[in-house]
Image: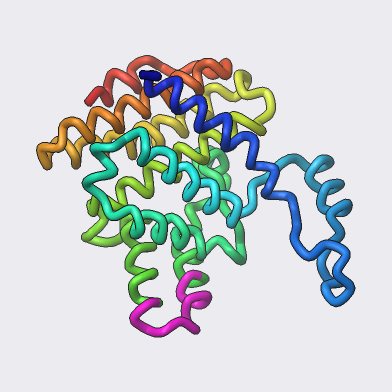
Amino acid sequence: MASKLQMLKQIYSFLAGVYPGNWQTRWGKTPYMSSFADQEDINNFVFSKGKFESVPGHVWACIGLWMQLRRICPNLNKLVDSEEIYERLWAHDIGETEMGDISLAVKIHGRLDEGKMDERKDFIKLTSSLPSREAKLLLGWFDEFEGVSEKENLLETLVARWVDNLQGDHFALVFGNDLSRHSETIEKIVKKRSAARSRALVDYLGKSGKKRAANEVWEITKAHIQIIQEAGIKINPAIIKANEA
């Protein structure tokens, strides 16, 4: 049987192949959709400015990543409501629709604040046309995801956070520039988000007596960090040792 590292590399290779969907449009050349940018204009922007990830592209990739991870983490998969995880992942960045994402790389250097209150306001505005019960549910999920709710330690929230950060790291590995030169920044991101959120999920599972599921999560996390290291990024081994399951 393939190791978790081999399986994660296969999944990441698949994601790398489908990421270009970020910059493909639908309805191209349709006469009554003339207000849409031509694909050529989009390609010119992407290739001249860099391959930024769209908010829907990130959400779509997170959903696809969980679809694969749940198959190689069968014990974790048995414990969660995957339909809810898909829905949480779909909804978690609705608030970034208008202002986009403020990357952690920018935040850790103190150039911008988190912007989460503005994001929450936009989230409320964008969901206001939904039935009130649905809007309230989505806002509750947003608050849990961002850690401003007493219910933040629900298992589905912790899994959604875990997937969110694995995917963000991977996109940067595929399209980032001079990664080894930015090892210090990337290491801070891994420590603050990927490793920390993996630790939170592992701890929750461990305290619940779900050791097999906890081991699956940490095996994937260790494989993820090894893949980052193989990209030429220096990661302090203490990050891994401090988070052993």
User: Horizontal placement of 95 versus 136: left or right?
Assistant: right
Q: In the image shown, does 87 or 207 lie closer to the viewer?
A: 87
User: Horizontal placement of 191 versus 245: left or right?
Assistant: right
Q: Residue at x 54, y 34 (%)?
A: 170
Q: In the image shown, does 244 or 216 lie closer to the viewer?
A: 216
- What percent of the width, then of the height, locates residue 220? 36, 28
Q: In the image shown, does 233 or 13 lie closer to the viewer?
A: 13
Q: Is residue 137 above or below residue 160?
A: below
Q: Quadrant of the C terminus?
A: top left
Q: Residue at x 48, y 70 (%)?
A: 123
Q: Is residue 216 above or below residue 76?
A: above
User: Horizontal placement of 204 versus 82: left or right?
Assistant: left
Tell me the magenta residue range.
123-134
Q: Is residue 39 above or below residue 5?
A: below
Q: Does the stretch in magenta take in 144?
A: no
Q: Is residue 186 above or below residue 97?
A: above
Q: Residue at x 42, y 21 (%)?
A: 5
- What percent of the width, then of the height, locates residue 161? 38, 47
Q: Quadrant of the N terminus?
A: top left
Q: Find the residue positioned furthest to the front.
A: 1
Q: Residue at x 60, y 19 (%)?
A: 180
- Quarter of the image for residue 191 reads top left
Q: How is the image coloured?
A: rainbow
- Quarter of the image for residue 190 reads top left
- Quarter of the image for residue 4 reads top left
Give the number of marks. 0
- What percent of the width, then of the height, locates residue 64? 50, 46
Q: In the image shown, does 145 or 119 lie closer to the viewer?
A: 145
- What percent of the width, then of the height, locates residue 197? 33, 39
